[in-house]
Amino acid sequence: MLVTDSQIHVWEVDGPDRPWPQPPRNEPQREGGFSAEEALAAMDAAGVDRAVLVPPTWVGENNATALEAAERFPDRLAVMGRFDIDAPDAQEQLAGWLDQPGMLGIRVTFLAKPRIEQLDDGSLEWFWDTCERHGIPLMMLLRGAPEKARPIVERRPGLKLILDHMALDLNVDAAGAWASMDRLVALARFPGVFVKVSSVPNFSAEPYPHRDVHPHLKRLYEAYGPQRLFWGSDVTRLKGTYADCLRMFQEELDILSADDRELVLGKSLADCLDWPE
């Protein structure tokens, strides 16, 4: 069984060769960057075989670092790239997006107020339509607002939409983060919606094995099934150890059969993103 992490950030420090947007969008999760080699060393130590690289928000829409890593380690790394929705040639970029070596899809984040408002004003309809037409899977960060995805998938049955970090709010305490669970479970009736069960320890108020979150994970399992749940770490932001983040899914969740674990820990993600194991 191959274990695949659905989210790792790699990046280089701000500099002439890899300039970040100014003013900065947000603070990096750690100083000094995080290289592909560091990611692979952490993966090896934890028992992780492959990972999807997700360029972080603070580097802007530059996917070069991640794509270069995937080119050097194609058997272990692939990319869900960031995309400049406002680029003049955005339509043309989408047409050839999946032709880039190592590119599996697009990750979009809705953090700033103007971007969040676009989810309601209809200005992104062309983007969802084009991604569906070209078969581009999307990862989407919706902090505490999974219901924003409903109009997107309701009208586009062919679009694959993966909700990052269970669409939980990363900026509230562990107990409050789960307030959006009912709205997330309600989306399970749309077969094109998938859920990254990533950064799970960050949403727990208890030490390993984080038993306070097990009932929530059970709800997601019962709603989505193992075919639509993808384990992940977001290791540079992770509370606790990388190995324990994985071990909880390998050993502590009684709801998962051996076959379920194989799906949640990699096979389902590989199938969704067309990244053969």
Image (tube, rainbow, N blue to C red):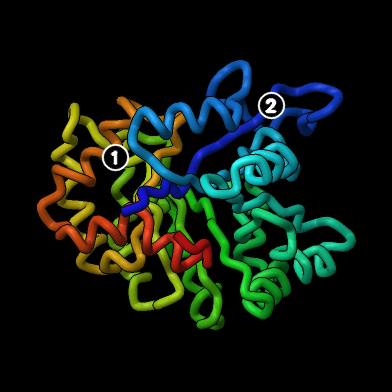
Mark before the other along the chain sequence, 1 or 2: 2
| Image spot of residue 87 (x, y percent) | 84, 56
Q: Residue furthest left?
A: 254
Q: Residue at x 34, y 71 (%)?
A: 188
Observer-nearest of 256 and 121: 256
Dot 2: element: loop
Residue 109 in sight in this render: no
Crowding at mark 1 (Cα within 10 Å: few <14, some 14-19, many 20+): many
Name the residue type under label 2.
Answer: Glu
Displayed quadrant of residue 85? bottom right
| Image spot of residue 143 (x, y percent) | 47, 48
The answer to whether residue 92 is above or below residue 50 is below
> As drawn, is 76 to the left or to the right of 94?
left
| Image spot of residue 126 (x, y percent) | 73, 74
Q: Image quadrant for the C terminus?
A: bottom left
The answer to whether residue 76 is above or below residue 260 is above
Displayed quadrant of residue 208? top left
Q: Residue at x 40, y 77 (%)?
A: 190
Observer-nearest of 234 and 46: 46
Looking at the rendered structure, which numbered label has been put on residue 77?
A: none
Disc 1 from disc 2: Cα separation: 26 Å
Q: Which residue is mark 1?
A: 246
The answer to whether residue 163 is above or below residue 22 is below
| Image spot of residue 19 (x, y percent) | 81, 29
Q: Residue at x 26, y 60 (%)?
A: 220
Q: Residue at x 68, y 45 (%)?
A: 71
Observer-nearest of 152 and 191: 191
Name the residue type under label 1.
Answer: Leu
Looking at the rendered structure, which numbered label has been put on residue 12?
A: 2
Residue 228 in sight in this render: yes
Displayed quadrant of residue 14? top right
Crowding at mark 2 (Cα within 10 Å: few <14, some 14-19, many 20+): some
